[in-house]
């Protein structure tokens, strides 16, 4: 991403349906060449937003700018953007080449130029050139995904929009295509805006994640920043398993704090966010220490996860298998973490404004 003006700007975008407001005056800048993932629970506004961005619906208020051109007033078929749908929308009785060439044919591109472009895109998507004459019905699920991407790239759009294109695939194929999409983004340098309900997809592929809730952006930042420094309990929970420790006047119920932690948290209140992997079992030293008992244990491959009953409430801990608790349910443990692992949300925003 560069420091130049954004390729896409959303200004005060609002969409209402009768007495329901689906989008509440949202703003967003997308850098040229960025891979932005937009995630959120059902009903958060993701689908409404993508429909406005691709021109399938009109905003109630606000504007969408592509560079210096306002595109929300331009019909969808005249915008220099393209959409890859969950359903792919390929023509089942046509060949791979005919599917890829379709948008070029609509624009009046000559037959030879269309074929040359289709073959070029087969190379780019790492499909054999003899697939040009292959019928879509003969293609596997992964091959159909690649054909849909080739068709989307056919007329060299400035932005590619994706509406959960991998959600119907099995796990192994989805993981393969996640990596291929990320690689395709790198090789083309195109701007990708990717709508998904899968946080895992967003974290694997994107440069930034925009988390939506109730028609607003809750937080927009790189995945590692959102994971480590969420702005609200909602975001913290959305980004994965998390422990919340109520902080009152610089103290956590039942916890012992080091002098450094006491100084850092003195007089403060709110919610401390602590990820399960940041807690240690029976540490030699820690900035925050709690005692508790094992309430449940779960094997997660190379890691063990424990649910611990403590004076601060129920906590989740994840450790390597070699650091497992010596004892079963009910075993006493001491938990500890470093000050750097604690993130304070000074004022919890657990309800949408």
Image (cartoon, rainbow, N blue to C red):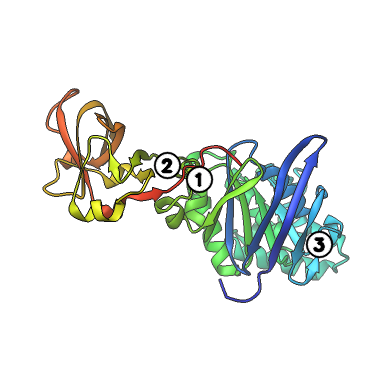
Local SS, label 1: helix
Distance between mark 1 and mark 3 Cα atoms: 29 Å
Q: Quadrant of the C terminus?
A: top right
Q: Position of residue 99 (x, y in %)?
A: 75, 53
Residue that carries the numbered disc 1 in the rendered image: 199
Residue 206 visible in image:
no
Is 7 located above or below residue 181 in the figure?
Answer: below
Question: Quick check: 259 above or below 254?
Answer: below
Q: Position of residue 65 (x, y in %)?
A: 76, 64
Residue indicated by mark 2: 240
Q: Give coordinates of residue 310: x percent, y percent.
A: 24, 30
Using the image as rendered, state which of residue 102 and residue 132 is in the foreground: 102
Taking 183 as reference, is 67 left or right? right
Q: Secondary structure at mark 3?
A: loop
Quarter where residue 326 is shown: top left
Which residue is labeled 3 in the image? 71
Q: Residues within 10 Å of mark 1 (few under 14, many from 20)?
A: some
**Direction top: furthest residue:** 330
Q: Earlier in the sequence, mark 2 or mark 3?
A: 3
Labels 2, 1: front one: 2
Does residue 350 show up? yes
Asked whether the residues under the numbered discs 2 and 1 touch, taking CB atoms below 8 Å apart as contact, a structural biologist would say: yes
Residue at screen point 24% across, 42% down: 319
**Residue found at x 78% / y 66%:** 114
Q: Earlier in the sequence, mark 2 or mark 1?
A: 1
Q: CA distance from mark 2 to mark 1?
A: 9 Å
User: How many residues crowd mark 2 within 10 Å: few (<14), some (14–19), many (20+)?
Assistant: few
């Amino acid at each position: 991403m560069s420091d130049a003006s954004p390729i896409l700007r959303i200004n005060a975008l609002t969409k209402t349906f009768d007495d329901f407001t689906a989008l509440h005056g949202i703003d967003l800048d997308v850098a040229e060449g960025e891979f932005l993932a937009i995630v959120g629970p059902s009903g958060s506004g993701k689908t409404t937003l993508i429909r406005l961005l691709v021109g399938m619906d009109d905003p109630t208020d606000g504007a969408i700018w592509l560079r210096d051109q306002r595109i929300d007033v331009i019909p969808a078929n005249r915008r220099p953007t393209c959409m890859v749908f969950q359903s792919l929308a390929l023509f089942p009785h046509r060949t791979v080449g005919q599917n890829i060439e379709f948008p070029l044919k609509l624009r009046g591109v000559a037959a030879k130029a269309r074929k040359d472009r289709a073959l070029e895109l087969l190379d780019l998507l790492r499909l054999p050139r003899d697939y040009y004459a292959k019928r879509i019905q003969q293609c596997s699920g992964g091959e159909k995904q690649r054909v849909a991407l080739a068709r989307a790239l056919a007329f060299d759009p400035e932005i590619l929009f994706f509406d959960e294109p991998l959600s119907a695939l099995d796990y192994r194929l989805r993981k393969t295509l996640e990596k291929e999409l990320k690689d395709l983004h790198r090789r083309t340098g195109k701007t990708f805006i990717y709508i998904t309900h899968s946080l895992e997809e967003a974290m694997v592929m994107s440069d930034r994640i925009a988390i939506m809730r109730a028609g607003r952006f809750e937080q927009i930042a790189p995945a590692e920043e959102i994971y480590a420094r969420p702005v609200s309990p909602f975001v913290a929970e959305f980004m994965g398993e998390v422990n919340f420790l109520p902080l009152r006047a610089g103290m956590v119920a039942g916890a012992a704090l080091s002098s450094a932690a006491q100084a850092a948290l003195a007089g403060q209140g709110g919610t401390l966010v602590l990820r399960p992997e940041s807690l240690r079992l029976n540490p030699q030293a820690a900035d925050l220490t709690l005692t508790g008992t094992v309430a449940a244990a779960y094997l997660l491959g190379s890691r063990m996860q424990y649910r611990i009953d403590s004076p601060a409430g129920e906590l989740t801990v994840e450790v390597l298998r070699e650091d497992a608790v010596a004892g079963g349910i009910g075993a006493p443990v001491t938990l500890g973490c470093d000050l750097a692992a604690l993130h304070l949300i000074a004022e919890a925003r657990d309800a949408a404004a």
